[in-house]
Image (spheres, rainbow, N blue to C red):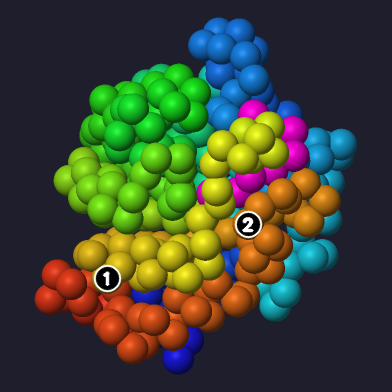
Amino acid sequence: MQLDHLVHTLGHHLKRRFGERVHKLALNADFTCPNRDGTLGRGGCTFCNVRAFSRAANLPLDQQLEQGKLDADRARKYLAYFQAYTNTYAEVSVLREMYETALRSADVVGLCVGTRPDCVPDAALDLLAGYRDRGAEVWLELGLQSAFDATLERVNRGHGFAAYRDAVTRAHVRGLQVCTHLIVGLPGETATMCRITLDQVLDAGVEGIKLHPLHIVRGSRMAAQFRRGELAPVGFDDYVTIAADLIRATPADVVFHRVSATAKRDVLLAPDWCAERWPSMQAIADNLARHGGQGTTLGQPWAPQPVLVP
């Protein structure tokens, strides 16, 4: 069975709104991070090397967009996804120029802005809310990873859960949609802890969730820990089981932007199954088909809705 029949995916959400497929174009606007530039720390989160998933910032944004459109399959509308590092970490004038460069293209119908919970000042939220008020699809993507402060400290995240809750509250005051990134397989965490994190995120209020297995990648501090035998990657079967259980425990109106993720082969150390996207997604779909799809645990199973033609 197809994942869209079991999970409220971003693809389904966008097709219902726009009446056709909308493709998300990943961009690298050459931002940095306060956990790298010395404001909070150096070296970033222990799991982080943005080169594992993002295109290089060697082209201007408008050229990155055009190249992404050439690579997109069967789409005529796009979301500009500011992906690499902290994409609200600049003066508002700089942010406005970056975002509006993307939105100048008539076929770009919205923005997804990836950032940290402690880097979303009110002025940045007001800017994003302005684009939403003009009819754009706008998602604020907050990298939380875990609701446990001890875990966040262990991976050198540089903020706690309170910063996340505050950012969500201020985003919701402005009517912004929030997508929260969660990592399964962080050091010291169990499946039960992953479920507690989900429950805390749902309690704070969220419109979207993005699930990732932990990647151990070259150039990260975790790479050295892995080589010393100090941590083990999450197993394929364990990830599939945990991800499917989390999806079943999520209300049907919450949009899943991703249920798994890959890293580039040239930087991926472990787990090796994260070099391929489709096997884990198919295994999750199979698990959901057998045991129930999104919302089943809550007695509110997801069912696909008819596509609305504008």
Residue 126, how many percent across, how many down?
39, 28
Mark 2, residue position: 271
Q: Can residue 207 be seen in this view?
A: no
From the image, which quarter does the C terminus lie in?
bottom left
In the rendered structure, find residue 248 and report the number of the disc placed on it.
1
267 or 19: nearer the viewer: 267
Marks 2 and 1, how far apart in space?
Answer: 25 Å
Q: Quadrant of residue 151?
A: top left
Going by the image, does 293 lie left or right of 34?
left
Q: Position of residue 19 (x, y in %)?
A: 49, 77
Q: Residue at position x 29%, y 84% from top?
A: 291
Q: Residue at x 83, y 46 (%)?
A: 63
Q: What element carries label 2?
A: loop
Residue bounds of the magenta highlight:
214-221
* Residue beneath the point at 30% across and 37% down: 147
Q: Residues within 10 Å of mark 1 (few under 14, many from 20)?
A: many
- The type of residue carrying mark 2 is Pro
Counting residues from the start of the chain, the first of labels 2 and 1 encountered is 1
Where residue 290 sits: x, y (%)? 33, 88
Badge 2 crowding class, 10 Å Cα cut-off, few under 14, some 14 to 19, many 20 or more, is: some
Name the residue at the front extreme: 229
Between circles 2 and 1, the one closer to the viewer is: 2
Q: Which residue is at the far top?
A: 39
Where residue 93 sits, quadrant-wise, is top right
Which quadrant of the rendered structure holds the N terminus?
Answer: bottom left
- Name the disc covering residue 96, or none: none
User: Which secondary structure dominates the residues rendered in magenta?
Assistant: loop
Is 288 left or right of 33, judged from the image as shown? left
Asked if residue 275 is among those painted magenta in the image, a careful observer would answer no
Mark 1, secondary structure of its residue: helix
Q: Is residue 216 magenta?
A: yes
